[in-house]
């Protein structure tokens, strides 16, 4: 039987619809990440959004409305996931700093923590708008994402769409099926909540240039590969925060970090490192040698939060946060979401830049 003349058109329309969905995936992932506070959970939410969109494609009246229609579906997916859930946080939000001699304690459930997101999965670049690009990067900082978790879900939607993604109040009102006045009121309350929060490390330092940030990362990885703690400590600002989710313990200051790395943290010596980017900044994956298999296995995904140089030449760009996410105690989906290998062999370089 000959195919219906409409069949090729239907296939072409389906292919175009799929391409349109994929084009919006990075923006959706960034939106869901700020809503949910977990990179791989955001990817799952976007995948569920895509499935719902396919099932409901006949309800999309105008192709021009695809973006708002898709974001409405993603918003409902996030609402479902957030229903009844406690907010995610960082160690610095939950306890006072410990010392290098403090007991590590037991890890808290994964859902306790704000987790990182791979830059390659989200829309972070605005090549024609440097100011917009910088603003987007700041809204991916762990401190900002943790602050968002204090907002009720609808206020979180309003603040992210209005302040981060620059939607108009009318567009947000249509998405939430409410009034512009209600959106403006929700935004005002959300801003007030964020202003009142006294979160540790809540103020964003000025970021270094891309070149300075790359240089800091290279210096840190080279020092770490040689396990030269003096060189590592020299790259840290006086008030650096060092944490290790899912462990609640965190440390303040280069001296405590150095003591810890020579003490309880010394098991990281001999790691192989892969440079990546996470949350708009430099990061790396660490693999520890496994004496039984002879392979190097995932150990930690570490974000390096940086600050620009000071006013004088003797105040170079520096590291203000070392955020270690310990893979053995977290879902394997964390490393997978960064496209990282499950293990490395002896031939793998000590440091790899991607």
Image: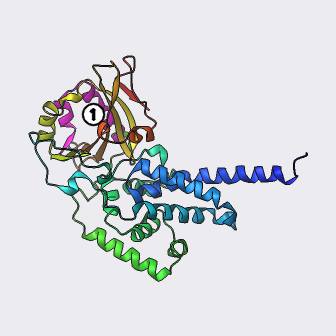
**Residue 80 spot, x, y in % from top left:** 45, 63
Q: Is residue 235 left or right of residue 282?
A: left
Is residue 125 at all visible to an observer of this figure? no
**Residue 314 spot, x, y in % from top left:** 19, 42
**Residue 292 spot, x, y in % from top left:** 29, 19
Q: Nearer the viewer, residue 36 or 164?
A: 36
Give the residues in magenta: 213-238
- Asked if 179 appears above or below 320 in the picture, the reply is below
**Residue 200 spot, x, y in % from top left:** 21, 57
Residue drawn at x 34%, y 49% is 115
Q: Nearer the viewer, residue 224 or 132?
A: 224
Q: Quadrant of residue 259?
A: top left
Is residue 330 at all visible to an observer of this figure? yes
- Asked if 232 appears above or below 325 in the picture, the reply is above
Residue position for label 1: 220
**Residue lying farthest to the front in this orientation:** 1
Secondary structure under tag 1 reads helix
Q: Quadrant of the N terminus?
A: top right
- Asked if 133 appears above or below 234 in the picture, the reply is below
């Amino acid at each position: 039987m000959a195919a219906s003349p409409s069949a090729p058109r239907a296939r072409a329309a389906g292919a175009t619809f799929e391409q349109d969905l994929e084009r919006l995936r990075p923006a959706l992932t960034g939106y869901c990440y700020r809503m949910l506070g977990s990179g791989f959970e955001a990817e799952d939410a976007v995948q569920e959004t895509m499935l719902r969109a396919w099932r409901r494609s006949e309800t999309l009246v105008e192709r021009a409305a695809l973006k708002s229609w898709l974001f409405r579906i993603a918003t409902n997916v996030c609402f479902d996931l957030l229903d009844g859930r406690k907010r995610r946080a960082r160690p610095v939000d939950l306890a006072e700093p410990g010392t290098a001699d403090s007991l590590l304690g037991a890890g808290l459930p994964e859902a306790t923590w704000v987790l990182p997101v791979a830059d390659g999965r989200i829309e972070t670049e605005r090549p024609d708008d440097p100011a917009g690009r910088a603003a987007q990067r700041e809204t991916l900082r762990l401190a900002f994402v943790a602050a968002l978790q204090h907002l009720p879900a609808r206020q979180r939607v309003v603040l992210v769409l209005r302040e981060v993604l620059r939607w108009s109040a009318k567009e947000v009102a249509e998405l939430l099926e409410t009034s512009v006045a209600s959106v403006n009121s929700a935004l005002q309350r959300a801003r007030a909540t964020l202003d009142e929060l006294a979160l540790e490390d809540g103020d964003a330092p000025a970021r270094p240039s891309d070149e300075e940030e790359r240089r800091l990362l290279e210096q840190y990885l080279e020092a770490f590969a040689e396990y030269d703690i003096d060189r590592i400590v020299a790259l840290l600002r006086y008030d650096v925060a060092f944490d290790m989710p899912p462990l609640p313990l965190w440390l303040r200051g280069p001296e405590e970090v150095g003591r810890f790395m020579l003490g309880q943290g010394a098991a990281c010596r001999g790691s192989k490192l892969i440079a990546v980017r996470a949350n708009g900044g430099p990061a790396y994956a660490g693999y520890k040698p496994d004496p039984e298999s002879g392979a190097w296995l995932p150990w930690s995904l570490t974000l390096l939060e940086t600050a620009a140089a000071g006013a004088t030449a003797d105040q170079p760009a520096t590291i203000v946060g070392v955020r270690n996410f310990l893979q053995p105690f977290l879902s394997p989906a964390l490393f997978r979401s960064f496209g990282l290998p499950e293990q490395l062999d002896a031939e793998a370089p000590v440091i790899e830049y991607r």
